[in-house]
Amino acid sequence: MGSRPRSGRGEAAAALFVLAAAAGVSSSGAGVGAIGANWGTQASHPLPPDTVVKMLKDNGFQKVKLFDAEDGTMSALRKGGLEVMVGIPNELLTTMANSMKAADKWVEKNVSNYLNKGCNVRPFCIKSIRLSQKLYQGPGTSSKKHFLAFVESWPVGLFTRYVAVGNEPFLSTYNGSFLLTTFPALKNIQSALVKAGLGNQIKVTVPQNADVYDTATGKPSDGDFRTDIHDRILEIVKFLSDTGGVFTVNIYPFISLYIDPNFPAEYAFFDGRSQPVVDGSATYTNMFDANHDTLIWALKKNGYGNLPIVIGEIGWPTDGDMNANAQLAQRFNQGFMTHIATGQGTPMRPGPIDAYLFSLIDEDDKSIQPGNFERHWGIYTYDGIPKYQLNFGVPNSQIKRASGVKYLDKKWCVLKPTVSLDDPKLPDTVSYACARADCTSLGYRTSCGMLDTRSNISYAYNSFYQKNDQDDVACGFSGYATTTGQDPSTGTCSGCYRCQAASYVGIIAVVVVVVPIIVFLNFVAPDCNEEAMWMAYLPRIDNLIFLTIRIIT
């Protein structure tokens, strides 16, 4: 997989414009079996959305899965040509379940709105595309140049493929909080998509945790859905089958290793080093295949053995636990991608596997209730630096980092060397810092687990200081702390300094430069001879268009 070369993009974009604007159909460059990424945004200092989209494209990702529909994220994706699974958070399920009007508004705002914005002013786009095609087909080199300048300056549209209604709503730790609202919300969102004319293009799904099914013997063939939610799951499964949806499941071998010290660690990976599990004629050498096929058997036993499956989340964390590090994460993620790249599938479901890696970037604001590892699932650090190398399918390729990231000053907050470790007030300052920042790298066999007591305290102070944008007040701690220009990083333990907040100069440029052009061409001169108008004005505006592109990119 790789990014399409820039040459020829104008012709391809023109075709996509015609499909999206004239026909209103979302397209997808991602085939079944292509690898995607989960993009979570629970970070204190998130990268600008445009930076993340560029990073996704630079590394050959063809699709992305979201947990919400935040405007900045969606607007950036609208320009990226990536396939999108947009999410409805669990906290909105009750609203969506109880109000068809709310479901309609959500679809209009978070789906239809961005599909239409792929060509911005719809009637204008249809006219201009048709005219531009004529110009491109003409004999003049000049008209080709201006046509391509116009096409290059416009987004190709947001390719929404799925709407994820909730996220793991039947997780056992939720104690049934969403059992009664998930299915009604699913039905209302589907109805809203149909009303919007998108029912055939965009499908609903409910990402489920793998704990919704189990097997008493450990063999996939004995798999079935949990008895306490059996009927609830089946009504969703039937609905997905009837509407052409997919069953989305999140599979985490790491979690099995985390909660069960007796779990055979090698079985979590794809190297074939573990003792295989034999189930009739099927042999399983890794947990993913076995878990996947346990779901297949559960579906098959209940009459839905052919329902398509999407792996919504799969990955390995790099910190916060003794089994969470970059080496194991690289081994697991590369092994998984190599495994699915063969297209062989699993014993019960041969063929390509549709999957999203979890996750793209670390999120330091996530809850750590599942474990301290929860903030460290990213392939990238918070600032877009790869933690390890992965081959995404392009020969001799190297994973690319985010470009253009801006940082705060290289300053750190540390414990004053004169402070005694016996001071009785010192522990309270550390507890205060860790409760409001991120100390999950401090622990047994974690990346900063080797630090001495003084360095542990400095780490906590600095985490709080950086999270608060290096505000001098955030390095007080009752006078126990001071700032320094000397990086306290040591070994695998990094004393980070944060990237700056997102910049919206690109959005401003579009509003200031491009929108007036649209207004003039579409409304001020609507009755002009189209070809004469374009031949007259395109030479004058192409510099503005290229300037806008340069500002944005």
Image (cartoon, rainbow, N blue to C red):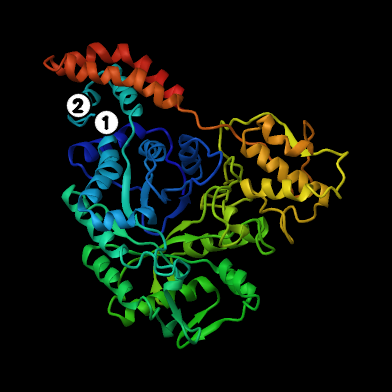
Query: Which residue shows up at 32% across the image and 45% down it?
Result: 159
As drawn, is 408 to the left or to the right of 429?
left
Classify mark 1: residues with Cα within 10 Å, few (<14), some (14-19) or many (20+).
some
- Disc 1 secondary structure class: loop
Q: Is residue 198 above or below residue 308?
A: above
Give the x, y percent position of residue 433: 68, 45
Give the x, y percent position of residue 160: 32, 48
Task: Quickly name the residue at label 2.
Answer: 124
Q: Depth check: give the residue in front, 420 or 389.
A: 420
As drawn, is 329 to the left or to the right of 410?
left
Residue 120: which disc?
A: 1
Residue contact at pointers 2 and 1, CB within 8 angstroms = yes
Hey, what amino acid is under mark 1? Asn
Q: Alpha-carbon distance for marks 2 and 1?
A: 9 Å
- Disc 2 secondary structure class: helix
Q: Depth check: give the residue in front, 352 or 463.
A: 463
Query: Which residue shows up at 40% across the image and 68% down it?
Result: 170
Q: Depth check: give the residue in front, 420 or 459.
A: 420
- Note whether residue 33 is visible: yes
Which residue lies most toward the front here? 424
